[in-house]
Image: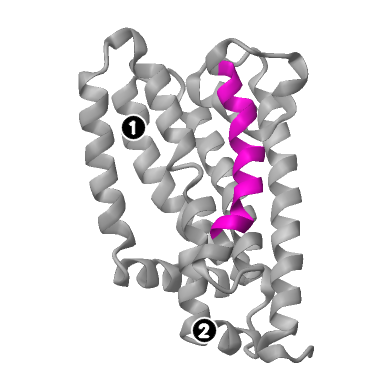
Amino acid sequence: MRTLALTLGDIRFQWKYGFYYVYAAFTLIYLMVLSVVPDSARRIVATVMIFSDPAAMGLFFMGAIVLLEKSQRVNGAIAVSPVRVFEYCLGKLFSIALVGLFVGSVLAVAGGTPDLLLCFAALILSSFICSSLGLVAAMKSSSLNRFILAAVPFELLIFIPPFLLLFDISHPLLSIHPGVAAIYLMYGDAENPFLLLLCLLIWTFATVFLSVRTVKKNFLSTGGIRL
């Protein structure tokens, strides 16, 4: 129940600061772009859009969300409350994933994605991975500029291997990369979707575990004193 309450609280927080208005505008822009893309390329363009934005938005926006909370002393209040660190992290991940799922589903339908269920599963798991990494970078940052610098290595790690596929650079081992696995599932061109989903699940557990450890360490040192 606390996780649900935290998720709803994050949704209200994001709504208050115009997060949803921004993504409504982005969705309209993406749909206009897809409407002028040739039918032969629409599916791949939609896949790139889904992976690079709705699935990865936590990696870009988590810094702004967490830094706003820090400026309002929200983290300090949560650190001394009965809320568990794991629940706090899940609230963040679920709230971001819901926005990504809505935007991504619109783009997937518009782009003609053949297997929507696999696409949605890849989108949600990718969102968890990217948001977890964004949370790690945000917790280690005291300003937006520091967050941007801290997030760059994660962005390179997530985005470079998948976009090599656009240049026909591939290798069987690349499939264990979460971004590559997600692209195959979103595009609907996966020879073994269950193995790709398993790969994404393993990466999801690993990154969520990392984010929980980082947030816990941050909460223990809230106010500059280790509790």
Q: Mark 1 points at which residue?
A: 107
Label 1 and label 2: CA atoms lie apart by 34 Å
Q: From the viewer's perspective, is residue 166 above or below residue 99?
A: above
- Residue drawn where x is 27% and y is 24% of the image: 34
Is residue 212 on the magenta stretch?
A: no
Q: Which segment is the magenta one?
A: 148-165
What kind of element bears circle 1?
A: helix
- In this picture, is 84 found above or below 130? below
Q: Nearer the viewer, mark 1 or mark 2?
A: 2
| Residue at 49%, 53% in the rendered image | 60
For label 2, the residue is 74
Which of these two is toward me, 99 or 17? 17
Residue 214 at what x, y percent from top left? 73, 67
Inspect the image, locate mark 2, and give the three-letter code of the amino acid beneath it.
Val
Q: Which residue is drawn at 54% across and 36% down?
A: 121
Specify the quadrant of the image occupied by residue 172. top right
